[in-house]
Image (cartoon, rainbow, N blue to C red):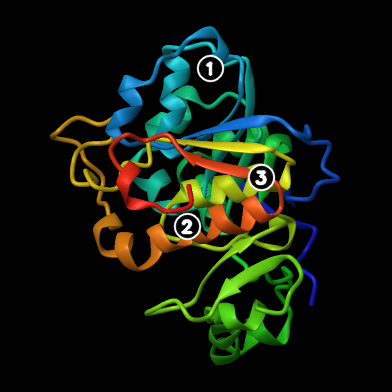
Amino acid sequence: MKPPKCIEIKAFNNSYSIVRFTQKNDLVSYKDLSVNIIASGPSISNINYDKDFLDSPTIFVNGSITLLEKFNFAKITGYVISDDRFIRHNPKIIENIYSGQPLFITKPVLHSLAENLPKLIEKYHDFINIIYPVDRPLLVNNKSSLLKSLPMLNKVAKKKLSLDKFKDHQDFVIDSTSYPKPIGVSLNIENGFVEAGTVAFVAAQLAYTLGAKHINLYGIDLINSNQPRFYESKDEIAPCKLDKAITDRIVPSFDLMGKVYNQHGVKVTNKSPVSKGLFRNI
């Protein structure tokens, strides 16, 4: 079953159709260009924000969009949020800084925006694109469907699928030998992205899909994940689950991405001096 072309969401008393990401959505292609992805590790504070850096195509994730308060980025490729917890913990960041850049979010994030920041949907619905994890496929909105009327079937339909199910799909590379669970990477997030425990991994798959030739990853510090993100204070730190996922999921997933994308002519480079020694292929 193909995912729906759009998702209906209510903000205040109005209903809006939020489109699913597709390369036909009048989005700018970054074919053969170098794209920077900025995560939220403390090392972000040490970047040299010179003209060349600020003029490069850039993807922001979560709180890194606060950099727009200090610097004039010339080419904002997109803003990616995949976890609705970020909206619940940091609504003021979105409310105060987001201003209509291409926004790529998951369905749970969309519902969290509708609940916490309905004005954003009302004002910027034309700039929002829905992306989704391949193992959590989007379902067609149909209030009268059998799944809606039978809670048990609805629960089964929403159950997370195994990545092994997609190992023969042309748009995914799945490593079923990875322990404790399979890992993978998407070659076209129009058909879904693969999760790895960090939104930067999602953003990198977006950059690849948009045609980037070189993907630079900034602020993926990992080792100091217990420290405040660059936009947080010591007294205001949102929960972080990176420590549990670093060895088993995040590092092997990025190494797989580096290997696979390199085979397709795309270089992925980790620019964080903090986590530099963790990876083999980026």
Residue 230, quarter of picture: top left
SS at circle 2: helix
Q: Give the residue displayed 18% in from the left and 46% down from the top.
A: 226
Q: Give the residue displayed 81% in from the left and 46% down from the top.
A: 23
* Depicted 94 relative to depicted 112: above or below: above
Q: Nearer the viewer, mark 3 or mark 1?
A: 3
Residue 138, quarter of picture: bottom right
Q: Is residue 161 left or right of residue 231?
A: right
Q: Give the residue displayed 59% in from the left and 73% down from the top.
A: 174
Q: Give the residue displayed 39% in from the left and 58% down from the top.
A: 251
Q: Is residue 143 left or right of residue 236?
A: right
Q: Are marks 2 and 3 in contact (CB under 8 Å)?
A: no
Residue type indicated by callout 2: Asp
Residue closer to the observer: 85 or 77: 77
Sequence order check, earlier mark of 3 and 1: 1
Q: Position of residue 170 (x, y in %)?
A: 76, 70
Q: Position of residue 225 (x, y in %)?
A: 24, 46
Mark 1 surroundings: few (<14), some (14-19) or many (≥20) residues within 10 A: some
Q: Position of residue 169 (x, y in %)?
A: 73, 74
Sequence order check, earlier mark of 2 and 3: 2
- Residue picked out by circle 2: 255
Alpha-carbon distance for marks 2 and 3? 13 Å
SS at circle 1: helix
* Depicted 18 relative to depicted 173: above or below: above
Alpha-carbon distance for marks 3 and 1? 19 Å
Whether residue 247 can be seen here: yes
Mark 2 surroundings: few (<14), some (14-19) or many (≥20) residues within 10 A: some
- Residue picked out by circle 3: 266
- Residue picked out by circle 1: 53
Q: Is residue 65 left or right of residue 151?
A: left
